[in-house]
Image (tube, grey):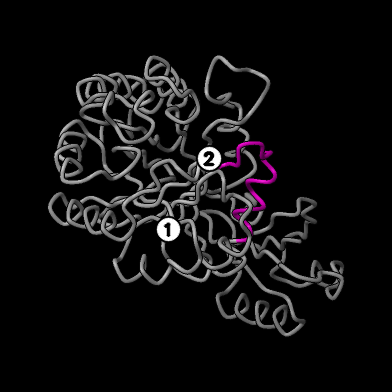
Amino acid sequence: MIAILRKNAAPEAVDHLIGWIEKKGLQTHVSHGENEIVIGLVGDTTKIDPFLLESMDIVERVQRVSEPFKKANRKFHPADSSIDCGFGVHIGAGEFQVIAGPCSVEGENLIRIARQVKEAGATMLRGGAYKPRTSPYAYQGMGPAGLDLLCEAREELKMPIVTEIMDPRDIDVFLEKKIDVMQIGARNAQNFPLLKEVGKTKTPVLLKRGMSGTIDELLMAAEYIMSEGNDNVILCERGIRTFETRTRNTFDLNAVPVLHYLSHLPVVADPSHATGYTRYVEPMALAATAAGADGLEIEVHDDPTHAWSDGAQALTPDQFCDLMRRIALIREAIAPEAAAE
């Protein structure tokens, strides 16, 4: 349920209404828009008489929200959310960012790759210190040593880092090292204990869609995080598993506008994991940009043939530089004011 307040609602009256709702045992989520204030009611809304609520002087109207996701719902928060990822980098609400770097942290070459992607225009650095792999015998990542290398790159280049967390027991380590954005990978998209634990932090979370997850399941996963108090969630479409075998996954580009319609959260697209092949990454990155994605996550490696994981889908720095040029052209066409900033 949401209560949409009148434009002239006094702050004291709004505070009084919020207090009255919370005394009924419900949580409130307040969104201040340019023309209206929206109060979202979360919990057992049967405790509130909607006719009584609507009769109050400052309430314009009351509306039921049928979707099970509340905090992630655009009805609760009509304006696009902007997530602060550190170092002055914001994503969403017109702010477009590119996250680039190797699939996994391998060693000192991380710094070299980081310098190259930043020079090409990337605004955030990605790299896996912990790697969920299908085979237990495949490379599993450097662990804490990989996090240290990411932190070194961050301090040198003054750009936020994005890296995957797989285990709730590692949260304290991520917080201690001040990881800027914690990534929840596709295999953990419904790891509800993990979602709840990252929700107890204020660290931004890049939440990837599960391999066979629906859009609603992705939004409900975001709801798990937000229900614990962390509203800094970035959604990521990274392809889903279908009957098609010519690409690693099927890139569900529909998800970008659908998620924007349903939710206020920023939407990032990952064409690297979606396609699985370098030759398809560029066209799908451009398509996602044109579809209105708030950002892209792209794998870049300076020697893909010798990458320790997912080299087949990594761009070289030169390829990435050319892609960034083309992305800028797409951005200029669809959002000329934002591209010029």
Tell me the residue at 45%/43% (across/down). 137
> What residue span does the magenta drawing correspond to?
209-224
Q: Quadrant of residue 35?
A: bottom right
Closer to the chain start, of discs 1 and 2, is 2
On the image, numbered disc 1 is attached to which residue?
204
- Label 1 Cα crowd, 10 Å radius (few <14 / some 14-19 / many 20+): many
Tell me the residue at 62%/49% (across/down). 74
In this picture, is 93 found above or below 63?
Answer: above
Q: Between marks 1 and 2, how big is the CA–CA gap?
A: 27 Å
In this picture, is 189 found above or below 199?
Answer: above
Q: Position of residue 61 (x, y in %)?
A: 76, 59
Position of 111 with respect to 85 (left or right) is: left
Tell me the residue at 77%/54% (across/down). 65
Q: Amino acid at mark 1?
A: Pro
Q: Position of residue 241 (x, y in %)?
A: 63, 29
Please give the count of numbered marks on the rendered protein: 2
As helix, strand or loop, the secondary structure at mark 2 comes to loop
Q: Which mark is residue 179?
A: none
Depth-wise, is mark 1 or mark 2 nearer the camera? Answer: 2
- Asked if the residue at tag 2 contacts the one at tag 1, i.e. Cβ–Cβ closer than 8 Å, the answer is no
Tell me the residue at 63%/46% (across/down). 218
In this picture, is 52 found above or below 324?
Answer: below
Predominant secondary structure in magenta?
Answer: helix
Q: Amino acid at mark 2?
A: Thr
Residue 169 in view of the camera: yes
In this picture, is 287 found above or below 65?
Answer: above
Task: Please tell me which residue lies in front, 81 or 112.
Answer: 112
On the image, numbered disc 2 is attached to which residue?
134
Task: Please tell me which residue lies in front, 25 or 198.
Answer: 198
Task: Please tell me which residue lies in front, 167 or 230.
Answer: 167
Residue extending farthest to the front is 137
Q: Position of residue 58 (x, y in %)?
A: 69, 69
